[in-house]
Amino acid sequence: MIMTVDELRQFVTTQEGDQALEARLQALEASIKRYTNNDFTRVLQENGGAWPADIRMGVVKLVQYDMSKAAGKAGIAAETISRHAVTYEARTAENTAAGYPIALMGFLRPYMRARFGQRRAWT
């Protein structure tokens, strides 16, 4: 696992239980591996089985984003008070990755592996 629940709690204050946070961390790890097309075995071997610090802090930011999204403010691009106008961000394939804003996923760029065409069985 990228980090333990206790390590995550040093950066994120939440009332979520340990099992819920552990499930969230496991889901993020699977998403990161799928998004980067990288199983990180070489990276983990080079670091003695520990995930690199940039990935660990990136995961903390993703969890913080999830927590803020739960608070109902995610997706708001601008909000004015007088005459109360709210402008929402447009979520498209170009500005999101794995369900997160592309700007939050930038820490994974050095770990991206090339994807080649998938084989199709022609019948």
Image: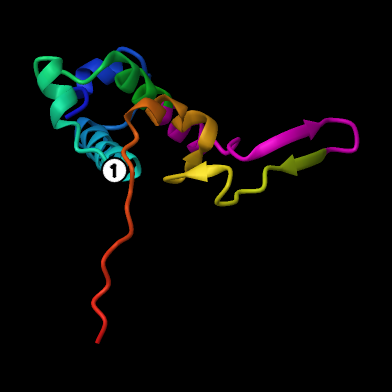
84 with respect to 69 (left or right): right
Query: For residue 84, what is the image quadrant?
Result: top right
Along the line of sight, the residue nearer the viewer: 88 or 122: 122
Query: For residue 60, what is the image quadrant?
Result: top left
Along the line of sight, the residue nearer the viewer: 74 or 91: 91
Q: Position of residue 46 (x, y in %)?
A: 13, 17
Q: At x 25% / y 36%, what residue is drawn?
A: 29
Q: At x 70% / y 35%, what residue is drawn?
A: 77
- The total of numbered circles placed on residues is 1
Location of the N terminus by quadrant is top left
Q: Position of residue 90 (x, y in %)?
A: 66, 48
Q: At x 18% / y 24%, what residue is drawn?
A: 43
Along the line of sight, the residue nearer the viewer: 121 or 13: 121
Q: Is residue 14 visible?
A: no
Location of the C terminus by quadrant is bottom left
The stretch in magenta equals 62-84
How many residues crowd mark 1 within 10 Å: few (<14), some (14–19), many (20+)? some
Q: For the residue labelled by badge 1, is the local secondary structure a helix, a strand or a loop?
A: loop
54 with respect to 102 (left or right): left
Q: Position of residue 103 (x, y in %)?
A: 53, 30
The residue where tag 1 is placed is 37
65 with respect to 88 (left or right): left
**Does 16 appear in magenta?**
no
How are the colours assigned in the image?
rainbow
Q: Is residue 79 above or below residue 48?
A: below
Q: Position of residue 3 (x, y in %)?
A: 21, 22
Q: Is residue 75 visible?
A: yes
Q: Amino acid at mark 1?
A: Asn
Query: For residue 24, what is the image quadrant?
Result: top left
Query: From this viewpoint, which residue is outermost toward the right?
Result: 83
